[in-house]
Amino acid sequence: MKWAALLLLAFGIAPCAQATALTDTLDKLERQGRESPEPALKALEALKVSRPDDEFRRQVTKGLILAANGRAKEARALADALRQANPVPGDSDGQAAADMVLAQLAQVEAQPEATARLAQSGLARLQSACAQQAPTCGWRLRWQLEMLASGAARIRGLDHDAQQLADSALTIAQAHQDPYRQSLSTLSLAIQAMRVDELDAAEARLREARQWAERSQEPDMKVRVLMFTAELHQRRNDLPGVQMHLREALALAQSAQLTRQTSNLWINLSDWALNAGRPQEAIRMLNQAHHGVRALNDRRLEATLHHNLGMARIALGQIAAGKREVEMGLALWEGSGAHDELAACLQEYSEALARVGDTSGALSAYHRERKLKREAMAADRETALASLHNRFERDAQKREIELQARENAVQRVRLDNHQARQRLWVWLAVLAGLIMVVLGLLVRRMRQAQQLLRRRQDDLRVQSEQDSLTGLANRRCLQRSLQAAQGSRGEYCGGLLLIDLDHFKRINDDYGHSGGDLVLKEVARRLSGLMGPGDVLGRWGGEEFAIHLNPAQPARGAQMAQAVLAAIGERPFELPTVSLTVTASVGFGAFPLSPDSLLIRWEQALNLADMALYLAKTQGRNQALGIRGLQVDGPEALADIEADFDDARRSGKVQLQAVAGPALHNPAHASQTPSPRLVEADGAVRPERAAVPSECPEPGHHGAESGESSRA
């Protein structure tokens, strides 16, 4: 029946199709082709067209269907054919259409960098092709390209670009009164609002998207809105709301025979089951999704399916099988450029292995996650600096053009005066005086502009070495301080402390990132009061801080660790509505370590302190562990310790010094793992409620600085 309906739509036999324009028919076939590609492609081939531009549009629609279903070879061949096509008068050109098809394929293959590059290329080509055309030229193609570019920017953590592109796409859809595109554009803005934790704004956008979805009468759009409404409930820790909306969406997708959405919903329900502690039920749901995912050739869905299946098996104690599934999912994500998804998977993987006692596996996954985050932060920093540099370059070029235009105007005045020299000597003298005044003002303005540019460059240098939230030194400044503390042989000399706030993710989950920001600022203020001459305090990233002690006094490490634990844990943190008791874990060391002949560079010192910190976290938190000495006889033995710190500790190769944190206010919790606590009005102390894990934030973003923990 479904094939027959598509064929009737293609031939124009159905009464409603008789009044539908060719472009609208192609739109419907393209949407149906995402769920049922073969019937849609057959209907598309059966569609009779006579004009070359209509045939061009049909080929574009075919390319989008092939790309959306991961049929890479066919999609690329069709894109090559489109590049050879002549531009369609008043619509678009073959180059832009080919870029759109390949961008759609890159999105399905989880390649956000390629998606962004191809979408931006298509927009540039389209703008050139439509420069002399009406404003409606190629509006559907432009909308599709902007939506692809917005999604890629969101995955890459470029929130500002993602917001601008989605806003532009919504403006196009509104101008042409297209309910389906208005609903999808509004949904994209809702997703972006959720990403930056503006949940009320996201809820308003979702209500608007649902209204447009009802008007479009497209089941696919209604299902999408319900899926992201479920995600909103998950961010609000409302598990019953998550299940209700996912079940409603699943019933609608199954009744409409939406294969892709049905598979996606089974995967989302498995995630809900894992969060609810039902791994066996999650496996059953993933088995429901398995066949559909393999048929869709969608790399993103397949990676998520393997990851969730592995997490469920690990939870059931099937560790080896679970690891294999998770690694298959990670292999699909690696190399895609989707750093957020990969980091989130690694964090969940590490925590799951730690829960079942696989310490070495958990540590390996943890280090992989930290390495990925460091690389992402470095890339984000370079992108931000390049963006600022380009902006200043554009401003400088604009000023140069303005100065050149003014100089040209002066030259024209001079030429006019030269022609009138014999007639207006007196006026020429007056005019020459005016010109000198104008030139003086121009020179003065130019000097002022140069001074302003130098001041802004100085401000930029300061900002690049200062954490924007706390005002402390940032990672870059701390690394430079550590490098400067190296001796003539390259050995690091000084005290080093790494500080990580315990259970900080719970604070963000329960009190929002604004609450987390207040805690981070107060921690920075308290720790600043402990610093002495020559000490450097900085924010290492997220909820981590680092202290580089004066190289002349490296033995202060234990004293400083005790002071840090007391400064953070002894007094509660006052938020607008509650008082929180927050503790920290510290890893520290005084370098050089014994034996004195051992050469430890600053990177190795940092790694040793980080492993001591991790050990402090795993052994109960609210404490500091310091490295007093190493039983090694050379660089190879030191490398062995770095490779398996826990084994080295047990075998006596590492001598540790433990510093206990302050006693918690409630003795009933003294033997439990410390966690943030609320102090009620009557003086009672209660633990925070558990939070449903949320997606990892994008590294380098302000929200990421203020929120998500890599060592909750």
Image (cartoon, helix red, strand yellow):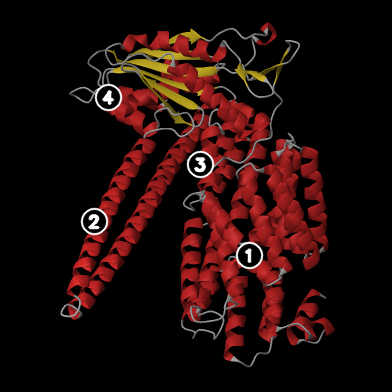
* Foreground pick, 517 / 585: 517
Q: Residue 91 is drawn in which quadrant?
A: bottom right
Asked whether the viewer can see residue 308, the reply is yes
In this rendering, position of residue 601 left or right of residue 33: left
Pick out the residue farthest to the left.
422
SS label for mark 1:
helix
Mark identifier at residue 171:
1
Disc 1 to disc 4, C-alpha distance: 62 Å
Instruction: Say which residue appears at 41% left-offset and 49% top-offset.
Output: 383
Q: Which sits earlier in the primary sequence, circle 2 or circle 1?
A: 1
- Answer whether labels 3 and 1 touch (C-beta < 8 Å): no
Asked if residue 288 shows in the view, the reply is no
Q: Amino acid at mark 4?
A: Pro
The residue lying furthest to the bottom in this view is: 50
The amino acid marked with disc number 2 is Gly
Q: Nearer the viewer, residue 92 or 609?
A: 92
Question: Looking at numbered disc 3 in the image, what kind of residue is underneath it?
Answer: His
